[in-house]
Structures are given as structure tokens and as C-alpha cells.
Amino acid sequence: MISPDAPRPIRPGEEIDIEVLNTYLRQHVPEIEQVLSVQQFPGGFSNLTYCLKTADQEYVLRRPPFGANIKGGHDMGREFRVLSLLKGNYDKIPEPVVYCESPDVLGAPFYIMKRVSGIILRAPMASKLNLPEALMRQLSEVLVDNLVEIHALDIQQTGLIQLGKPDGYVQRQVEGWIRRYQTAETDSIPAMNQVGDWLRGNYPPEQSPAFLHNDYKFDNVVLAPDPTTGEPTPFITGVLDWEMATVGDPLMDLGATLAYWSEAGDSPAYRNFNLTWLPGNLTRQDVVRRYAERSGRDVTSILFYYVFGLYKNAVIAQQIYARWKQGHSQDARFGHLLPMIIELADKAANSIERGEI
């Protein structure tokens, strides 16, 4: 039996003042009863996620990491706004409750949403999972189909169009992530510069715009558990972590998903990135084919989007590693990210050389 995603004691240096929080809630959100305990969800390397427990309800609080200074990637107001726009248009989200812009309460802006309970398949679980291959295939197929559903949302009717400017989106993303890497660079990684130059010289024709999650993977999807066996079922009850959601070329979203999608033949370091290498999962090529069939979109230039996804993941890891190196985080996981950054850069460079994902 697989346990639902469970919170744990808060990591040192990332505590929340429960009394201050309760005072804020009494004044601004009286429908939330007194918070009796606060724990932390261990997964993720970006925003901090806490579980708030009242007498009869559980909520989730999200706030930026301590020491972060990357507004675009840690904008709590934007993430809350995304959930508010999705509410009523896409049912697989946590219900947003309140957003606090002031840093005076908890030291940074934060928002609270209702908790969506269920199973999240995270990479560290891979060695303990013993799911039938047929079920694993269903789970990966459902993951792709749900991405197609997200991309099919009407960005005009839902108001999601206000979240971004789709014209020139791909070029802005490439240039922006190259700048982020240069700002956060701590070590010489030649492949990162090579890949950045290749991206600048190989822009594909942009697709018609869609709403993008921008961090779509098993780790951010909640699956309904089988009430008898406790195994995950191929039913998605929630999609989490909408902090980077926007409007733009949907193949950028697919490329990001592919960049997380490890396979059995990948290196051990890269397989640690996800559990899609387990028997039964679709391959990256299978993912592309299924997405094309379900969405009707042209995926001819998927190599560009895959390479960009790898590059962006490397930059995100570099930013986190740089914060750790500067002493802004005590999370020991962050100190071991450099090999993964190099692995991602090399994988992108090798894909370019081979001409395939």
C-alpha cells in the first residue's frame, strides 16, 4: 500500500510562527478555524509548502524560500491568481482561499488553499514501487492526456489570456533563462553556454497559444488511491504548483515535461530526476506521439522544446544551488545539485548532436 503524500516536521530555519498566523487568520479569514499544527511537505526544490491542520480541515500554505530574490519564479500573488482563474474552468486544482501580500506576517507573501489529498509519485519512491506495468502505462498515458486537456482550455473565455503575452514567447523565454543562468553561475559548465547559443540560433515557428502549466510532471499531480489496495489509480484529482503558469507556445510545456521524463537507458543521476523509467511507462517518443494524436498539434520541432526544457531545469537547479552556496538555505539537498546541473547540460548537448530527444 502506498501512503498518500504526507507532511513531516519542518526543516530547521524554515519555521512558521503559528501564533502570528492565527492572529492574521482571525482578522482576515475567520472561516479558517484555529490552526492547531503546522508541518512541511518534503518534496520540491522551489517554493516552500506547509500543511496547516485545524480541528476538522487541512489547508496548504505556500511561500517563497528563505533568501529567494526571484520574483518571477516565486510570485505568490500570481500563483493565487492562476488558481482563481482556473476555478470553475478546470476542476483538478486545490481551491484557493486567501492571499497575503504583506511580508510583515510571515516574512514573505504567502497564500493558502484547501488540501487535495491523494498519492503523488515522487522520484525517491521508485525503488519501493512495485506497480504492474499495465497500471504504470495507464498512469503515464493519463498524465499526457491531462496535459492536452490543460492546453485545450479557452484562454479568452476563461480570462487566462491576461496571464501572459503569447507573441514572441519562445524567444523571451530563451533570452530570459540565459540571463538567469549568467546571473546565478557559480562554476564553469561549457555545455550550458553551447546549448544557450544553439537555442538562440534555432527558433521554431510558434504554435497557436495555449495555457501552460510550465512544471508538469508526476511530482505535481495528485492521483486518487484505490480504497482497497492503496495503489494509485489512473484518475488525477489535482494538479499542483502553478507558480510558473502562463500563456504561450504549448510545446514549451510539452518540452518541459519531456525534460523530466527519464528512461531506463538514461544515467543513474538522470533517473533520479523522475520515476518514468520504471517498466510500463511511455518513452519520450511515445509521449510526443500520444500528445500529437490527442492534441492535433505539429510536433516536428520537438527537439528544440526538449533541449530548452533541459536547459531551463539546469538553470533552476543552478539558481537553487547558488542560494545554497551563498548561505541562504540550510537544506542539505541543495548542496548536491551541481552534478545534476552538469548532467542536464550534457544531455541537452548530446541530444543536439544526435538530433533526437
Image: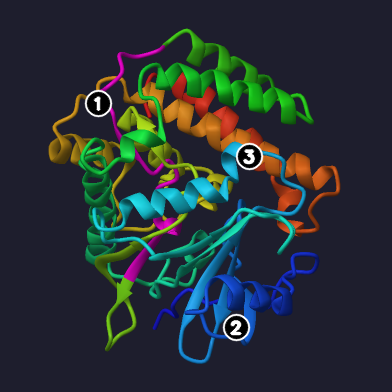
Badge 2 local density, few (<14 within 10 Å), some, or many (20+)? Answer: some
**Which residue is under mark 2?**
35
Q: Amino acid at mark 3?
A: Lys
Circles 1 and 3 in contact, beta carbons < 8 Å: no
**Which residue is under mark 3?**
71
Q: Taking 221 as reference, is 36 above or below it?
A: below
Q: Residue at x 75, y 70 (%)?
A: 15
Q: CA distance from mark 2 to mark 1?
A: 48 Å
Name the element at disc 2: loop
The answer to if 286 sits in the magenta stretch is: no
As drawn, is 157 to the left or to the right of 173?
Answer: left
**Which mark is on residue 218?**
none
The answer to if 210 sits in the magenta stretch is: yes
Q: Which residues are magenta?
A: 203-223
> Which part of the image, by quadrant, shows the C terminus?
top left
Q: Amino acid at mark 1?
A: Val
Image spot of residue 345 (x, y percent):
59, 29
Name the element at disc 3: helix
Q: CA distance from mark 3 to mark 2?
A: 28 Å
Name the element at disc 1: loop
Badge 1 local density, few (<14 within 10 Å), some, or many (20+)? Answer: some
Q: Amino acid at mark 2?
A: Val
As drawn, is 120 to the left or to the right of 183?
Answer: left
Foreground label between 1 and 3: 3
**Which residue is under mark 1?**
299
Q: CA distance from mark 1 to mark 3?
A: 32 Å
Q: Taking 305 as reference, is 256 above or below it?
A: below
Image spot of residue 244 (x, y percent):
48, 42
Mark toward the start of the polypeptide (3 vs 2): 2
Q: Residue at x 75, y 54 (%)?
A: 66
Mark toward the start of the polypeptide (2 vs 1): 2
